[in-house]
Image (spheres, grey):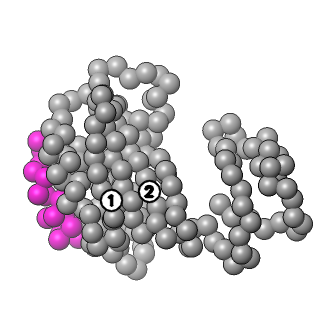
Amino acid sequence: AHFSLSEMRAAGRLRTSLNAILPKDIRIMSLRTVHRGFHAQKDARRKGYEYRIYHGPVLSPFLSDYVLHFRGNLDVNSMQEASGLLTGRHDFSGLTSSRSTVSSKVRTLGRSELSRKGLFLSYRVEGDGFLHHQIRNIVGTLLEVGTGKRPAADMQKILRSRDRRTAGPTAPAHGLCLVKVWY
């Protein structure tokens, strides 16, 4: 986020004041002064997201707002193969919302990896920008790969098709988290 102030304030005091009035699930971790023309969204060079999936029988209620609980069988190796096919510069029309109105749907992913740690799966993706529902549509498609509804190679077919109808469903939002923004 970015904002302008009419007068300078000490960053520590400003952070404390803002956190006092924000909802408890939103926190400002750090602040810094930037040039007057800075824009938090338009000046971002790269963003990193993580989508978390719990692949076990019972999900803790403390995690239910932050991870997708998936109980079915999953071929994680196929999901990892499919996620790797998205690295590079591609037209992601087939993996974005059909209502997207941006002029170009070409994006570059420097990272697209699925990993497993115990009962948790983590899809980590970094890129120069993301389209509406792009990551959630990728995860929905990866889950179809994992359940055997489609082969990993379908990711390339979806990219070539540029047709949203060829991809899997949109995964729920509660597993997705913005991890980092590079400026």
State which quadrant residue 161 falls in: bottom left
The quadrant in which the N terminus is found is bottom right
Vertical position of residue 158 compared to residue 142: above or below: below
Q: For the residue carrying disc 2, how many other residues have a C-alpha within 10 Å: few (<14), some (14-19), or many (20+)?
A: many
Q: Position of residue 28 (x, y in %)?
A: 68, 48
- Residue 144 position within the rendered picture, expressed as x and y whole percent measured from the top left: 19, 45
Specify whether 107 is left or right of 177. Answer: left
Identify residue type, mark 2.
Answer: Gly
Disc 2 designates what residue?
A: 48
Q: Pointer 2 and pointer 1: residues touching (CB < 8 Å)?
A: yes
* Element carrying mark 1: strand
Q: To which quarter of the image does residue 88 belong?
A: bottom left
Residue, x 71% and y 75% (percent of image)?
Answer: 35
Left of 15 or right of it: where is 172? left
Determine if residue 168 is in view.
no
Residue nearest the observer in this picture, 41 or 147: 41
Q: Can you give x and y, in whole percent of width and height, for residue 25 in the image?
A: 63, 38
Residue 149 in magenta? yes
Q: Amino acid at mark 1?
A: Arg
Number of the label disc, if any, that sits on residue 145? none
Region in magenta:
147-166
Q: Secondary structure at mark 2?
A: strand
Q: Is 157 situated above or below 28?
A: below
Taking the image as drawn, is residue 47 in sight? yes
The verdict on residue 142 being magenta is no
Quadrant housing the C terminus: bottom right
Residue at image position (29%, 20%) is 57
Q: Residue at x 39, y 64 (%)?
A: 127
- Say left or right for 121 vs 179: left
Badge 1 crowding class, 10 Å Cα cut-off, few under 14, some 14 to 19, many 20 or more, is: some
Q: Earlier in the sequence, mark 2 or mark 1?
A: 2
Q: Quadrant of residue 75?
A: top left
